[in-house]
Amino acid sequence: MRKIILIILTVIATSFFFFPFVFTFFPIANTKMMLGALGVVMLLFNIAKGKMAKLNKSFLILTLLSLAVCFVSLLSMTINNTHDGSYSKYTISMWVWLSAAYVVINMIRGVHGRVSVELVCLYLIAVCVIQCTIAVTIDVFPIVKHFVDSFLEGEGFMGKMNNRMYGIGCALDVAGGRFSAILIMIAFLLPKVSQWDHSEKYLLFLIVSFLIISVIGNIIGRTTLLGMIIGLVYIIWALNFRPDMFNGKRRQYGLLIISITSAMTIVLVLLYNTDPHWRRMIQFGFEGFFSLAEKGRWEVSSNIQLLDSYVFPDNWKTWIIGDGFFESTLNEPFYTGTDYKDFYKTTDVGYLRFIFYFGITGLLAFSLFMIKVGQECINKFSTYRYLFACLTLLNFIIWFKVSTDIFLVFAPFLCMSTQDEEDGTK
């Protein structure tokens, strides 16, 4: 019973880290910041106890690269005489994410006596499934929605708007990007399950999780589709071209995947045909597929809006160092141009927002940082090098749509050591 309680607390902490939010009764800091503060205390305690003599060299390199992002941000602000410091403190943000992840890693190690890539992935998967379940519950039961809204600060960014599903800190494209990363993790874990104890139980959990996150995740944020496609491609490739990865259980895996997928498809078809609300939700989440079936072409309203957002700079200065604006211009005291209420130049395209903010110079600095993040995980965990390579690729694909990065997905693994993985696989 004690271990079950500790596991539940660890899942909650992981959710607070992966889907941070602000409590209405404590609007000073979000849950990530709270965990980050705890992580600093935990780190100092471990250093005092001699458990951590020094910080890894990779953290110094990542800090220097993140400082380069901050420097270019400040340079753009200075040249353009603006006050938009969206990325001027990115190093602090990075360390807060790492500190919060450090708490999660230490809790996992404390509960299980070890920590490994697989364990961290399983906790992140469990959190995403729970968030999807919460989102459905909020959508179906008004009393639950009222309860969650009573302590969940924020409106649009937290998903508290009409006609959109949301969890606790889990909403919109930000959640979609994280769901995508988790779906890729599931795809890479599936071939390895046969080597685990209680493999049948984990196999069922992973397949069901993949389907739940794919369906509900797409309804919450359609960026989830990216991870779903990448994950499916990898699973199909592994089943057909790497049967050795399944320890002779390829047929069993294939049949189970087909069976569970068929069962969930039947449930979705029934909901689609009997419940108008679910019909609207399913049509929204998989609008592209419905368009393909009905019109013979892939057409999604948000993608049409996205294409309209491809607005490019009209001068070399902006291309090189940007205009110093990332967010709305309404709060800029000396701005005299066209007012932009939401995003500068009305574009939400990640690459363009970075270019308009601090030019190709800043975009290259940020890209080098993210590549180094992925490289550190690839070098540290060679068994999962292709997983981290795909996650790095996912980050750059997401930027074609939104400007959010998925550094937090890498953060727990950066807080692990190579020895952790060796101990976790024994």
Image: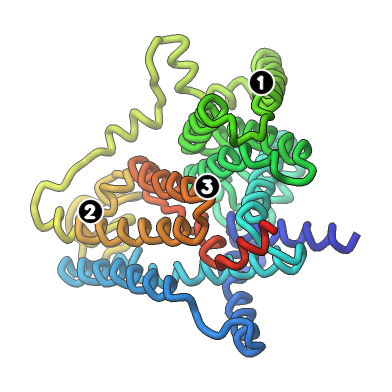
- In this view, 306 is above or below 317: above
Tag 3 residue: 178
Which residue occupies the foreground of this view, 146 or 120? Answer: 120
Provide residue 251's location: percent of width, then percent of height: 67, 23
Q: Could you tell me how far apart the alpha carbons at marks 2 and 1 are, in whole angstroms?
A: 46 Å
Q: Is residue 113 above or below residue 244?
A: below
Distance from disc 2 to disc 3, alpha carbons, whole Å, reads 25 Å
Estimate the x, y position of residue 71 in percent, counting from the top left: 26, 72
Image quadrant containing the C terminus: bottom right
**Residue under the point 52% across and 45% down:** 181
- Disc 2 marks a residue whose amino acid type is Phe
Determine the residue located farthest toward the bottom in the rendered image.
48
Q: Residue at x 25, y 51 (%)?
A: 339
First along the sequence among labels 2 and 1: 1
Q: Secondary structure at mark 1?
A: helix
Circle 1 sits on which residue?
258
Tell me, yes or no, if residue 271 can be seen here.
no
Asked if residue 150 shows in the view, the reply is: yes
Q: Amino acid at mark 3?
A: Arg
Please report the residue visible at 45 percent of the width from the left and 59 percent of the height from the top.
379
Q: Nearer the viewer, mark 3 or mark 1?
A: 1
Label 3 CA crowd tier, 10 Å (few <14, some 14–19, many 20+): many
Q: Earlier in the sequence, mark 2 or mark 3?
A: 3
Residue under pointer 2:
356
Q: Decide if residue 381 is on the left or right side of residue 273.
A: left
